[in-house]
Image: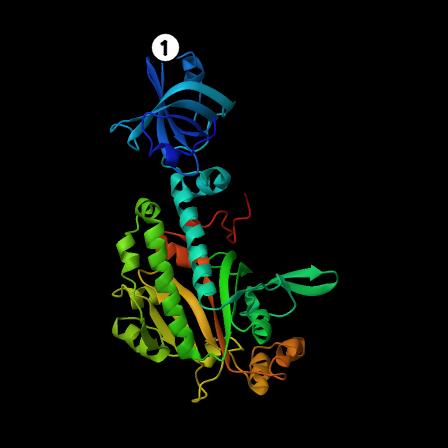
Amino acid sequence: MKRVYVSEALKTRNKKVLLRGWIYRIRKTKNVVFIILRDSTDIIQCAVKSDNPYFNVANALTIESSIEVIGRVKGDRRAVTGAEVQVDRVHVFQNAEKYPLTKDLSVEHLMNYRHLWIRSKKMVNALKVREQVLKSFREWYFKNGYHETSGPMFVGTKGEEGGELFELDYFGQTAYLTQTSQMYLEAQIFALEKVFTIGPTFRAEKSRTRKHLTEFLMMEAEMPFYDLKMTMKDLEGMIVFVCRDVAKKCKKELVELGQDPKYLLSIKAPFEKKTYEECIDELRRKGSKIKYGEDIGTEDEKLLMSDRSQPLFITHWPRALKAFYMKVSENGETVECCDLQAPKGFGEIVGGSERETDIKEIVANLERDGDDPKKYEWYLDLRRYGSVPHAGYGLGIARFLAWVCNAEHVRDVVPFPRFINRLRP
């Protein structure tokens, strides 16, 4: 017989099927062994009765044992997913040892057994939503004339904050794990025009919050002949598209994760836009002690978004708070940038800006930051040979997913999260 997946079996009645998977739950009585079998698509109840020649085989099975069953599917409202397989035959691939994961375990214990916890229904749902989010982003990009590309992971220059770099020896040279592919995408807009990449990013941040990882997936894009206004319009259209696409295609998974798909369908463009200065004023009215010129931290982000259900663009930050490559505004005090805050305290999910095209400004910013402009000669060449106005952004996939899935922590939407105290498994 040809294997049938559980999701297909659940749609059939009075038909013999061959299923393969793992034991999600098992309940043994004198007359029947009830096996809840899971595969990558769903779970289904399988019943092995005492008069079955495989009853003793089934009775010896344990949680997470890998098996194959052949039986007939019957409708049963009492069963967990509304159907039951009346088993004729059981084949055991491996009878598992005592499973180390049970209910009500600590986060630390679950993290130590991440390689097993990833099988949980919660993680399976999150990973399926993650897969669809990436598909939806790519669909939007390809529909809007972008080319997918990549940048190197080993780099010789910083991209964001110097203190957040992972430094390593690269055959006698000082190298870093990349913080961003932005500069390498900028180089490629002169060949391909609109480009994007989805790849790993590394930040040596010592933050211990629900939003920070030391390694995460970053989606970045660069667009020639773009300004800040055009960039924000693209972001609005893309995020609304992805939210709606995921809400329609992952309804079951979202509901089981505690997210109402109707909420994602309610996300609409255009998003609210406020300058950094306006946000500082609002925060102070709400009781914050923040001063102009200070970064907006986690608690102030929560306060700012506490009464908002839609994303918010914070624009035109003081130039001293932002990276060397951001275009200086006409006032000379701020930069043409935007940070997109997600509602419900999930924090900044996008950071973007127009890119500075004036070599003198870039060099001055690098010197201000104590960096050596000579290391950036290749980057400055982009301003010497056919430079054009352009802009770009980076979107953290984990934070975006945490918001979409209504997850308590970014670790809940990443297969193997990395923190400052977590290198294994």
**Label 1 crowd bin: few (<14), some (14–19), many (20+), radius 10 Å:** few
In this rendering, the answer to whether 302 lies above or below 262 is below
Residue 109, image x and y in percent?
45, 39
**211 and 313: which is toward the camera:** 313
In the rendered image, is residue 306 in sight?
A: yes
Residue 64, image x and y in percent?
45, 29
**Residue type pointed to by label 1:** Asp
Residue furthest right in the image? 172
Residue 110, image x and y in percent?
44, 40
Q: How many marks?
A: 1
Q: Quadrant of residue 192?
A: bottom right
**412 and 108: which is toward the camera:** 412
The residue under the point 50% across, 47% down is 416
Describe residue 98's horizontal placement relative to residue 183 as left or right: left
In this rendering, the answer to whether 400 lies above or below 291 is above
In the rendered image, is residue 406 in sight?
A: no
Describe residue 141's horizontal placement relative to residue 363 as left or right: left
The residue under the point 59% across, 85% down is 359
In this rendering, the answer to whether 250 lies above or below 61 is below
Secondary element at tag 1: loop
Q: Quadrant of residue 25?
A: top left
- To which residue does mark 1 refer? 51
Specify the color scheme.
rainbow
Residue 324, image x and y in percent?
54, 78
- Location of the C terminus by quadrant is top right
